Image: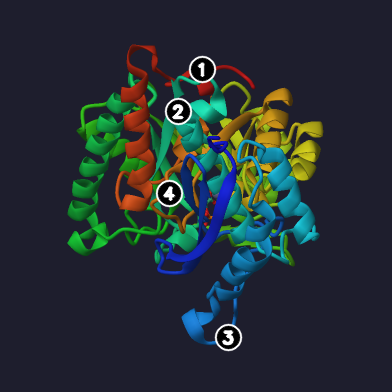
Amino acid sequence: MLQDPFVITQVRGVLALDSRGNPTVKAVVRTAGGVGVAIAPSGASKSTKEAVELRDGGKRWGGMGVSQAIAGLNTVVAPRLIGLDSREQARIDGMLIELDGTPNKSKIGGNVTTAVSLAVAKAAASSAGLELFQYLGGPGARTLPTPLLNVINGGVHAGNQLAFQEFIIIPVGASAFSEAMRMAVEVYKSLKSYIADKYGKTATNLGDEGGYAPPMREVREALTALSEAIRSAGYELGSDFYLGIDAASSQFYDPERKTYTVDGKELDAGSLLELYASLVEEFSIAYLEDPFHEDDLEHSAELTARLSGKTLVVGDDLYATNVKYLAAGIAKRATSGALVKVNQVGTLTEALQYVRMAWEGGMRPVVSHRSGDTEDPFIADLAVAVGAGLIKTGAPARSERLAKYNRLLEIEDLLGPVATYAGREPFKGPA
Ligand code: PGA
Ligand code: ZN
């Protein structure tokens, strides 16, 4: 008798290194009829609400080792999965949650649960002979997301003085994903020339997400650079491209003084809100992530209402891909979008629940990489599968970022004439 192709026959945890050279967890899940390999990414500007990565501490690897995490994967998790049907994602993720038993995956580690959960989905897709995006999204999955390309890095992702973490170009005017990438790369190159001319050649070094990290001090300097780069590449800001910002503002918030330090000035939440409102007008900013610190739903709600129909305000650290925090955000209309990072919560099933809740609550899900990422392109397929319409995965540089863009180019080719490009659609009208 033929063996069921979906049955899990082997689960193995292996050490991998992320784009910052830090150890992380790779899971290899074999079934009778396929194999799935997934690697957990790792953030730098983390929310305090995130699933916890299990790290060894001590001297080796600067404390970042994952040998206990991998040992736990191989001795505790693996035996429980052997013999299960790899399509039973929810049941398997439920087992991981139960096996861990903590509210933040701190016992077996969010790095372990993420790698295993994603590898199980890939193994099931491979056993079914389906592309991952088709397995996860069904036959209707055919929308390529508009890329949010972080081409100037600041905050904790760069060694400069920019308070905001990410300065983003958004090629909304393209008619296809591949055209969007061409336009974005042209602007990325023209930005390099702009920076070299103005700040010297050494200023064109790259930050953690492949964007330039020039010695800029003020946020308007970065936004002006993006506008100029778009113009000199022959495109128009406001029609071909929009701009975006991930402020990641918990990183420059002082909880004691209740102030934010931007451009060397100390601002209260009200003044920061006014700064955002004027930047939106000046620079066609259609995307604004984490404008206030991770527990401030109130000011976020005020800004969302004020920019309604103009700018998508998105919660990342605010929600940490967790339905518990998202529910509170929806109740307060704190944002119009919600960032999705599977490793913030630790399992695919929980991330998919979060995406569903976002849609139902009138929020746009935005699928995202981490600043410490790997060659695993899982999120490219995830973005198409859930029809997010937006993906945030860095600059068009460094292979851990390009793995996602290149996979999306491949998906566009696989879909052929039925592929559509989200373009401007995610930014239309109030959410
Ligand atoms: P992180 O940053 O991966 O370092 O947390 C990315 C983001 O804030 O969106
Ligand atoms: Zn963010």
Kind of residue indicated by mark 4? Asp
Cβ of disc 2 within 8 Å of ligand 1? no
Instruction: Say which residue appears at 22% left-offset and 49% top-offset.
Output: 192
Q: CA distance from mark 4 to mark 3?
A: 28 Å
- Density class for disc 1 (Cα within 10 Å; few <14, some 14-19, many ≥20) is few
Asked if the residue under mark 2 is in contact with the one under mark 1, i.e. CB atoms within 8 Å, the reply is: no
Indicate the secondary structure of the residue bearing disc 3.
loop
- 120 or 136: nearer the viewer: 120
Q: Is residue 236 visible?
A: no
Residue that carries the numbered disc 4 in the rendered image: 376
Residue mark closest to the camera, 2 vs 3: 3
Q: CA distance from mark 4 to mark 1?
A: 23 Å
Residue that carries the numbered disc 3 in the rendered image: 58
- Density class for disc 2 (Cα within 10 Å; few <14, some 14-19, many ≥20) is many
Q: Is residue 371 found left or right of 7 in the rendered image?
A: left
Residue mark closest to the camera, 2 vs 4: 4
Residue that carries the numbered disc 2 in the rendered image: 145
Q: Which mark is residue 139?
A: 1
- 298 or 4: nearer the viewer: 4
Residue mark closest to the camera, 4 vs 3: 4
- 22 or 220: nearer the viewer: 22
Q: CA distance from mark 1 to mark 2?
A: 17 Å
Seen in the picture, residue 342 relative to 305 is either above or below; the reply is below
Kind of residue indicated by mark 2? Pro
Q: Earlier in the sequence, mark 2 or mark 3?
A: 3
Q: Is residue 217 visible?
A: yes
Q: Earlier in the sequence, mark 3 or mark 1?
A: 3
Kind of residue indicated by mark 3? Gly
Image coordinates of residue 218 in percent, x first then y, are 43, 54
Indicate the secondary structure of the residue bearing disc 4.
loop
